[in-house]
Image: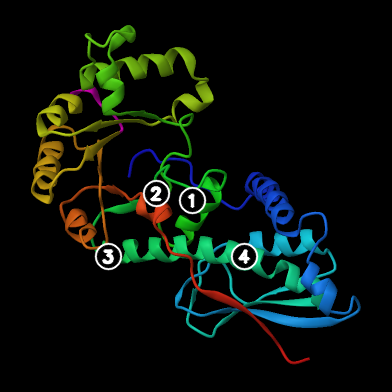
Amino acid sequence: MGKEFHQVRWDTSLHDEAVALLRLAIREDLGPLGDSTSKALIPKSALGTAAVVARRAGIIAGIPVAELAAQMIDPSLKWVEERADGEAVMPGDRIARLEGSARSILAAERLLLNILGRLSGVASLAQEYVEAVSGTRARIYDTRKTTPGWRHLEKYAVQMGGGYNHRSGLFDAILIKDNHLAFGRGGTRSARFSPAGAVAQARQWIKRRVPQLVRSRMIVEIEVDSLAQLAEVLTADPDIVLLDNMTPAQLREAVTLRDRTNPVVELEASGGVTLDTVREIGASGVDRISVGALTHSATSLDLGLDWLES
């Protein structure tokens, strides 16, 4: 395993991002008046206990965010965790309990379920892909096809499902794609980059412009769509070559070419990967498979909030 992209963890930075998102979410749901229905029907002094319950099997993700949301709505609410992020649940399993003001529990209900449902859906889909390539050398990666503002939370959820994080943004890795090559050198579209030339220029830019502490960790990856491009670019020593929309047969040829020419370079398959195709892609011998569907097509895990007997 060569260089790795930054892997998102639950830390102070992610906590602060979650706080910013939750402030917006609370404002859009409660507005200036709060929960009008509960205020009309539920006595202010009423207390209750409710459980977050799984309606469908899956992998849980987002527990720290949900707890934070409950505390931001009402600091007196007590959150009792019964399942941790990354744990599998079955229908009927309790994930957490909320104890305290009945009004506050009802105010928090939809926000908690939205957060946990979305992130658990991402984690559950990631696990399906990870299980599908079990026994191969391939690792499953997410992409930047994320919900704006939710990227790091969704990447965190991918990890809870056993997947890996690709680059977090344009800032933290070099990824040379076809449009970079097509635009050309010096802003002149008639002077196209060769794949190897683009890698060499990227290495020079890193050497001149990137601080030394970061330089050794910055990944240089390049996208190719033919075996001829792969053969050329392997001589330039990129860290990773992204094989775009290649068939399983082409991927196998690419792995053979890499193993013969420059075995330290990692190969990443990408483009239209589905649960139906990922196993065969993994069996080709590639090191990485990036799957946009992990975040752009995940279905929220079905969860509910049920009152418990006092």
Query: Is residue 20 left or right of 135 when viewed as pictured?
Result: right
Callout 1 touching callout 2 (CB < 8 Å) = yes
Q: CA distance from mark 4 to mark 1?
A: 15 Å
* Badge 4: residue crowd in 10 Å (few <14, some 14–19, many ≥20): many
Residue 93: x and y in percent read 55, 83
Residue 16: x and y in percent read 69, 46
> In the rendered structure, which amino acid carries the disc numbered 2?
Asp
Query: Is residue 292 left or right of 147 when viewed as pictured?
Result: left
- Residue at mark 3: 132
- Residue at mark 4: 63
N-term-proximal mark, 4 vs 2: 4
Callout 1 touching callout 3 (CB < 8 Å) = no
> In the rendered structure, which amino acid carries the disc numbered 3?
Ala
Give the color scheme: rainbow, by chain, secondary structure or one colour: rainbow
Where is residue 232, by image quadrant? top left
Callout 3 touching callout 2 (CB < 8 Å) = no
Magenta region, residue range: 235-239
Q: Secondary structure at mark 2?
A: loop
The vertical placement of 64 against 198, above or below, is below
Q: Residue furthest right?
A: 45
Query: Is residue 186 left or right of 225 when viewed as pictured?
Result: right
> In the rendered structure, which amino acid carries the disc numbered 1?
Lys
Q: Is residue 213 visible?
A: yes
N-term-proximal mark, 3 vs 2: 3
> In the rendered structure, which amino acid carries the disc numbered 4?
Ile
- Residue at mark 2: 142
